[in-house]
Amino acid sequence: MRAFRAINLVIAFIAATAPMAHVLEMISKLTMDGPLWLIIQQHLYRGWGETFGPVEILALFTTLVLLVIRWHESRARLVYLVAALCYVAMLADFFIFNRPVNAAVNSWTPDSLPADWSAYRLKWEIGHALTALFSLIAFVALIWQRVRDECAST
């Protein structure tokens, strides 16, 4: 059980890295002109979804396993439930905000940028900011539960 909780924390940490990277880039990306932003979207982030999507799903899965195992303990149940709901929100957030923007951007060229391209950029950035928030809440909740468990066992 202890090893599984450690694996869950590592996965939770990795699941938070991509959304946090997007948040840290946000201020610079919001100042870019359309063609530069488009090039970055189409080239820099290629493969991120295939890498980090499964990690987010794995974070949800391992957290759900811990939720089931600790269901009989009300405090642990609440913590794992909060973390699991955050992972569900992260996945929903992707489908609501980021996936539609990714689908649109993939077909654009610098010459075919629509007049409202910056609205797409803002939607994409908001989606990742929300994902970062959810991932941090989940990660902190899981760390907090781990600390509580360690304190209870001493």
Image (cartoon, rainbow, N blue to C red):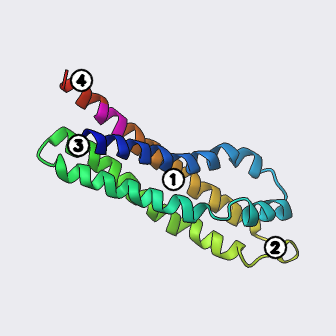
Label 1, on which residue? 131
State the CA–CA distance, disc 1 to disc 4: 30 Å
Left or right of residue 82: residue 26? right
Q: Nearer the viewer, mark 2 or mark 3?
A: 3
Element assignment for label 3: loop
Q: Position of residue 130 (x, y in %)?
A: 52, 52
Q: Tell me which segment is drawn in magenta.
A: 142-146
Q: Position of residue 66 (x, y in %)?
A: 25, 49
Element assignment for label 4: helix
Q: Earlier in the sequence, mark 3 or mark 1?
A: 3
Q: Nearer the viewer, residue 83 or 153?
A: 153
Check if mark 1's residue and mark 2's residue have beta carbons within 8 Å: no
- Disc marking residue 151: 4
Residue 145 among those drawn in magenta: yes
State the CA–CA distance, disc 1 to disc 2: 26 Å
Query: As shown in the figure, which amino acid type bears the numbered disc 1?
Result: Thr
Label 3, on which residue? 1
Query: As shown in the figure, which amino acid type bears the numbered disc 3?
Result: Met
